[in-house]
Each structure stands twice: as structure tokens, then as C-alpha cells.
Image (tube, grey):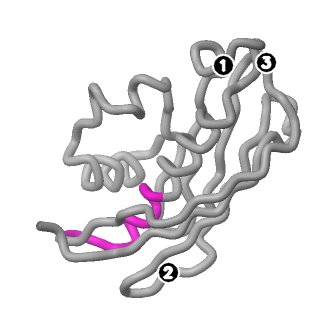
Amino acid sequence: MNPDDQARLDAVYHGDHKGSLITTMGIEFVEVSAERVVARMPVEGNTQPYGLLHGGASCVLAETIGSTGAAVHAGPGRQAVGVEINATHHRAATSGHVTGVATRVHGGRTVATYEIEITDDEGRRVCTSRLTCMLRDAR
């Protein structure tokens, strides 16, 4: 990740997201901006009993990267709070990593919406999600 992306990520998470669900799920950020956030997550450790990537894990990745983009969009002194997420699971992933790309669809003063595409290591779409965040002043 380039230094500007790292600075944006540090500003959102106050320099530390250790001990959070991001760390537990093994999510690694690749690119961070208000327009687009890219991150990857291992399939191993995030599966359901059948060995397939858990649908909830896909939703965690989607909400993490979408809300990160929304927080960057909101700017200093503001925060993003997820208010609605949906996900369509297209195919199973059983190994390797999945990569999520969150692209801003709408960025206003009080609401931001991101479309998230999650793909496997072969570039096949695993999940499509949409996240809407409310933007408000930080407390």
C-alpha cells in the first residue's frame, strides 16, 4: 500500500485496528481512497463446516471495505455507520484468498453507498454486495 493510502487508513482507524474483527478475519488492505477500497482476506479460517467461504465472512469483508471508504469520504471529525448491507453469493471459494473492491456509488454529506465485488484468486465473482452508511459527526 502506498504511503497516502496508509495515511488514510491510519486516520480512519486512528493508526490501530489490532484486536478488531479486521485482524481476526485476516483482512489486508491494498488500496484506500474515498472512491475505491481494495482488500483481501484468506478463505482458510473463514469457512463454514463444509469448507466453503462463509457468507458472513464475505459480508464482513464487504462492510469493512465499504465503511472504510465511507469514513475516508466523510473526512476528519466525522464517522461512518453502516445502516444497510445486502449480498448475493454467486459461487463458493474453498482455498486461497478473496479480494474485495468497494466502489463508491454515492457520496453525499449524510449518506454514502458502495458497491462491493468479491472475487476469488482466479478472478471469478464470489459475491456482490451493496453497503449504505450514514455519515455523522464523531462523538
Circle 1 sits in a helix, a strand or a loop, which is it?
loop
Question: Which numbered disc covers residue 103?
Answer: none
Q: Residue 107 has which mark?
A: 2
Quarter-of-image position of residue 73: bottom left
Viewer-nearest residue: 38 or 127: 127
**Amino acid at pointer 3:** Thr
Instruction: Give the distance between the C-alpha atoms of the residues marked 2 and 1, in whole angstroms.
Output: 33 Å
| 3D distance between C-alphas at marks 2 and 3 | 34 Å
Q: Quadrant of residue 18?
A: top left
Q: Nearer the viewer, residue 31 or 57?
A: 57
Q: Which residue in the protein does label 3 denote?
A: 94
Is 32 one of the magenta-colored residues?
Answer: no
Task: Check disc 1 and report the residue beneath it.
Answer: 47
Q: Residue furthest front?
A: 49
**Which segment is the magenta one?**
67-76
User: Where does the image place residue 85, in percent across and percent down from the top left?
Assistant: 58, 59
- Judging from the image, what secondary structure is the residue with disc 2 in? strand
Q: Amino acid at mark 1?
A: Thr
